[in-house]
Amino acid sequence: DSGVTQTPKHLITATGQRVTLRCSPRSGDLSVYWYQQSLDQGLQFLIQYYNGEERAKGNILERFSAQQFPDLHSELNLSSLELGDSALYFCASSVLASGSETQYFGPGTRLLVL
Amino acid sequence: AQKVTQAQTEISVVEKEDVTLDCVYETRDTTYYLFWYKQPPSGELVFLIRRNSFDEQNEISGRYSWNFQKSTSSFNFTITASQVVDSAVYFCALSIEFGSARQLTFGSGTQLTVLP
């Protein structure tokens, strides 16, 4: 158990809908990362937050957004969902925002868009 | 830009055999970090090791060992006396100290199947 929690574990929804994925980092970690794992794209970085502020952006679609709250938990919002958004979404956390930090991953949220 | 290549898509071995998973990376930065993660069938990503670019010492942890060679930009992972529980997808990843690529850049993964 990495100490990172993600809810829900599974999510089934329809195209055009909006969903919110939630992540709680390890105790003491200030940085949260979101990754998407799909069969065709592999594991891809989406976005990073550090202590409530956005720090880095990867291949995140405009339909997706995220935020980190004062209690350091983070939410990833996916809207106008398409079939291709079906994937495993991981949250990871680390103490600081540096690339030297080890990122510990949550169990993931498996999203299926029908 | 950073890149990680895991050329072995799938490897199948019989229990107790040794197996090496290859990882080749590309970066122009002199300070970088290499990682290995394991993804068992249950789906979570489990951290195995982190190595920084200034430390070329090989590491051994039980049946696991890692060989880091800057000259060939490789960070290979060997499992000695493999067990069925080692069956998983293994990912190699790279990050740099600063800049926009502080996040992990992952390879495509190697699916390891250990047969009883």
Image (cartoon, coloured by chain):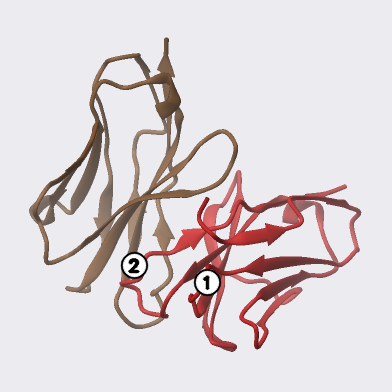
Chain colours: A red, B brown
Position in image of residue A28 (x %, y %) = 48, 76
Query: Which residue ends up furthest to the top in the rendered image?
Result: B116
**Horizontally, is B94 left or right of B55 in the view?**
right
Which residue is at 27% across, 39% downward?
A: B22
**Horizontally, is A15 left or right of A74 in the view?**
right
Residue nearest the observer in this picture, A51 or B95: A51
Query: Which residue ends up furthest to the front in the rendered image?
Result: A27
Disc 1 packing (10 Å; few <14; some 14–19; many ≥20): few
**Horizontally, is A76 left or right of B46 in the view?**
right
Is residue A71 depicted above or below B78 in this figure?
below
To the question of a shared chain for discs 2 and 1, the answer is no
Q: Quadrant of residue B6?
A: top left
On the image, numbered disc 1 is attached to which residue?
A27
Position in image of residue B116 (x %, y %) = 42, 9
On the image, numbered disc 2 is attached to which residue?
B95
Which residue is at 65% across, 88% downward?
A: A70
User: From the viewer's perspective, is the residue at label 2 or at label 1 nearer?
Assistant: 1
Q: Quadrant of the N terminus of chain B?
A: bottom left
How many marks the image carries: the answer is 2
Is residue B109 depicted above or below A37 in this figure?
above
Which residue is at 52% across, 54% downward?
A: A43
Residue nearest the observer in this picture, B24 or A1: A1
> Label 2 marks which chain's residue?
B
